[in-house]
Image: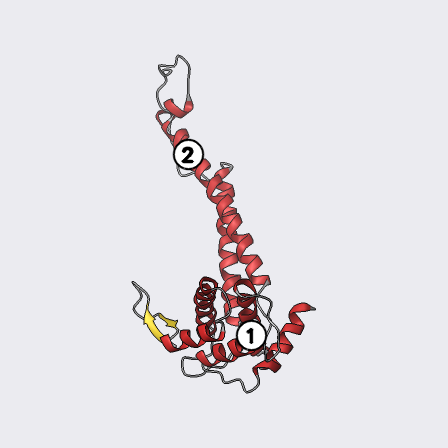
Amino acid sequence: MKDILLPGKKSFPYPMFEEYEKEVFRRILSNFDKRKVENFILQLQFVCLRALQYRKSIDQLEYCKPDMSSEKEELNGIISQLEKAFLLLQKIATGQRTPRRYHSLSDLGSIWPSKKGYYDPLEDDPIYAENYKASGHAHNAGSEIKTLIDIFKNALGNYPNGAGRPSGTVHQELAGQIAEVYKRYIGDPTSSINDPFPAILGMTFKAVGITLKYPEKLAAKILKSLTT
């Protein structure tokens, strides 16, 4: 695969199949609809992009589940700050905290009713009007922050515990995604040497820097797990 830069990105390489790699895929899948094959190749590039993005380092195609303890601590801190902001907004929304207070009778505004013919605090009392406006904004902002709190708490609950990952699952995860794309555009994959899927599997792994000696064995393993 070769790296090209996306428009507007200075340091984000997008892996693209070399033309010879595309030709290999086309040759392997020569018995299938050409348009579907081209869509398959495009989607396969996206799978490879994800694999390369999540590798451990740019020079080392190893994958591991990182220790997320510091990220979880930071997330807890964000949730705590959002909850404090939410409590403050609740006080503003209910009038327990206001941006302005009355200090004298003159602060109450005009003693004459408005042109409506009756006293309207939103028109005749500028301090009340300002506090009322703040209350409304606080209510709306509080709803948004409450949603944010729920999102962050949900994300926190999905963080993995501890670091590390069994090395075998990396190949299985990548092969499983390749199988999903294959099924969508080409057909049900099998592990038979007469089926193009094992060859596609080996070629795709090679494109991201992994050599598979027996792609049909990996195919059999992941296809069994996908059907159970």
Amino acid type of the residue that numbered disc 1 sits on in the rendered structure = Phe
Q: Where is residue 16 drawn, in percent x and y?
A: 38, 72
Amino acid type of the residue that numbered disc 2 sits on in the rendered structure = Lys
Identify the residue position indicated by label 2 in the image. 133
Other-residue count near label 1 (Cα within 10 Å), few / some / many at <14 / 14–19 / ≥20 = many
Please state, as top left, top right, bottom left or bottom right, where the C terminus lies in the image.
Answer: bottom right
Rendered residue at 46%/41% (across/down): 138
Element on which disc 1 rests: helix
Please state, as top left, top right, bottom left or bottom right, where the N terminus lies in the image.
Answer: bottom left
Using the image as rendered, state which of residue 161 and residue 45 is in the foreground.
45
Which quadrant would residue 225 be assigned to in this image? bottom right
Give me the C-alpha separation between circle 2 and circle 1: 63 Å
Identify the residue position indicated by label 1 in the image. 197
Other-residue count near label 2 (Cα within 10 Å), few / some / many at <14 / 14–19 / ≥20 = few
| Residue 103 disc label | none
Residue 166 appears in the rendering: no
Determine whether, in the image, residue 80 is placed left or right of residue 221. Answer: left
Using the image as rendered, state which of residue 204 and residue 69 is in the foreground.
204
Residue 51 appears in the rendering: yes
Q: Is residue 142 above or below residue 220?
A: above
Residue found at the far bottom of this picture: 213
Q: Where is residue 221 drawn, in percent x and y?
A: 64, 77
Determine whether, in the image, residue 129 is placed left or right of residue 8. Answer: right
